[in-house]
Amino acid sequence: MAPVRDPNTLSNYGEWQTKHTTANLTLNFADKCLHGSVLLELESLTDKASTEIILDSSYLAVSSVKLNAAPLPWEIKPRTKYLGSPVHIALADGAAKGAVVKLEIDVATTGDCTALQWLTPAQTSNKKAPFMFSQCQAIHARSLFPCQDTPGVKSTYDFNITSPYVVVASGVPVSDAPQETDGGKLYKFQQKVPIPSYLFALASGDIATAPIGKRSSVATGPNELQASQWELEHDMDKFMDAAEKLVFPYKWGEYNVLVLPPSFPYGGMENPIFTFATPTIISGDRQNVDVIAHELAHSWSGNLVTSCSWEHFWLNEGWTMYLERRIQAVVHNDDAHFDFSAIRGWTALEEAIGEFGKDHEFTKLCINHKDIDPDDAFSTVPYEKGFHFVWYLDRLVGRENFDKFIPHYFGKWATKSLDSFEFKDTFLDFFGAPEYKSLEDKIAWIDWEGRFFSTGLPPKPKFNTSLVDVCFELAEKWKQKDFSPSTSDISSWTGNQVLVFLNSVQEFEEPLAVEKSQLLGKVYGLSDSKNVELKSQYYQIAMRAKDSSSYQGVADLLGEVGRMKFVRTLFRSLNEVDRELALKTFEKNRDFYHPICRQMVEKDLGLAESK
């Protein structure tokens, strides 16, 4: 038997382990349903000692289970809260250790499926076709089909997906020409690198593609294709080259980006082959593309080398933040960009820990997930506190030495899953070699238990503050009555520097006067910007200044963007200064917003109670 380390699965993956999955599924947009069959190839980890296979499921309609075309006894057990309803499948004789059994399960999703989002044509930019996308992280793959829904199990995949619209998946297309079928067209993909269930991904809709790199394409709605291609093609290969030099060559074949419809309420997801990205990265100024560095870095940390459970999620995200910032420093040709991003991350970490409370379990690097839904524990903490641990180890042993450890670590654990203690052992084994004898005393002082299990903030390092200091200095000038701004103030800055500056102005004890707020938007081009990050932050300053001339601009933006990060904050602020316009704007765009976003805004506007 294999060790069982994940409290967020009900599967008996210590006795059976999925090696390959074939998904034969059809998308029914009319019924908002995914139906068909999955073929699971499971290896026995015992010698006939296990006589049942237990799979995770959640809100699924299972109609049959077969072994070699012969029906098997099966039962769906009662639901266990967020963990779902396990499927118990009887194998009277078990199987010899190492033997592989093939289960075919007929299945359909239901209206309670938590992994799929179905968008109406009204929620897309050209309003011509519906759209569907999946989001399986953390434990939602079990609402697509019965599986061992744990990052501790990795499987290769074949995708055979039928849809009336173009399909993309977390696999490499098998052929350019999909086959015509009764239900639309059959799209085939293969994923030859083993992946955990949470990286199973599908999307379908009115999708067009264009190249953005030597092995990369962007996929999105036809109306957004040209702008998306321009936004990403300049830096895509630079990001890839920097990442490959830092770790080792990319293992997945293609790296593509799916820019989702404007009503997509989230930030993005690092699905292999096709990163699912928020449309707000397409800003017309190439200032938000650094998010691609993060998702690309996941191709090594998280996707290739994976935490064995959500308790060790920092191994995915902390490492990814570290690699992202190393990539940024190379692409920008300035190490100060590493620190600049880290400073912004530190601020986010302080805010997250402040909201939880410094002694909260969720502020630990390694979180006890017993009786905890991993979605509830999700926060900035594993990203930024995890990053600070990786960066601490980098500084401790020295950059030259740490750069030798990086490919060793990712090579040793490629296609596998590990926990924090195995990471510790890997680090100590590597630096226990004779050539690192001089580091012995330093390494002996690492407080592994403290780093893994202490609550609150980690020790704060000394940052290079050169890129943020200029932001704060300019903000201070805006407090002066006689200050005369110029476009040259920010002409050499990155978009993120402008954002730091705007955040600082927003936090002034006294809001800007209306005239100065208007001057800010005009001189720095913020009121006409296509960069939603900058424009939305400027509108927050304008609304705080009670600049009524900006209110319609806010309303217009709320009809173009569906990401909750912007929609909810803008609606809350607009509601404070012009409730009538806020309500009118919401009613006008309610069908455009994703159902989750719509529900949240109804609560924010006090409409939910009146229903």
Image (cartoon, rainbow, N blue to C red):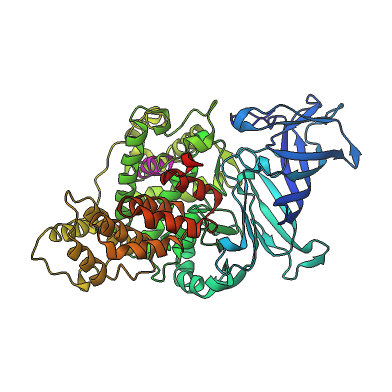
Q: Position of residue 588 (x, y in %)?
A: 49, 60
Tell me if 237 is positioned left or right of 74 in this view. left
Q: Nearer the viewer, residue 396 or 569?
A: 569
Q: Position of residue 517 (x, y in %)?
A: 22, 63
Q: Residue furthest right?
A: 70
Number of numbered tags placed on the structure image: 0
Q: Nearer the viewer, residue 116 or 432?
A: 116
Any part of residue 491 in sight: no
Picture quarter with the N terminus: top right
Q: Quadrant of residue 446?
A: top left
The reply to whether the magenta stretch includes residue 55 is: no
Identity of the residue drawn at 53% across and 59% down: 592
The reply to whether the magenta stretch includes residue 386 is: yes
Main SS category, magenta section: helix
Q: Position of residue 367 (x, y in %)?
A: 47, 31
Q: Which residues are magenta?
A: 382-391
Q: Position of residue 384 (x, y in %)?
A: 38, 43
Identity of the residue drawn at 14% across and 57% down: 476
Q: Nearer the viewer, residue 110 or 53?
A: 110
Any part of residue 530 in sight: yes
Identity of the residue drawn at 16% across and 51% down: 510
Identity of the residue drawn at 73% across and 50% down: 34
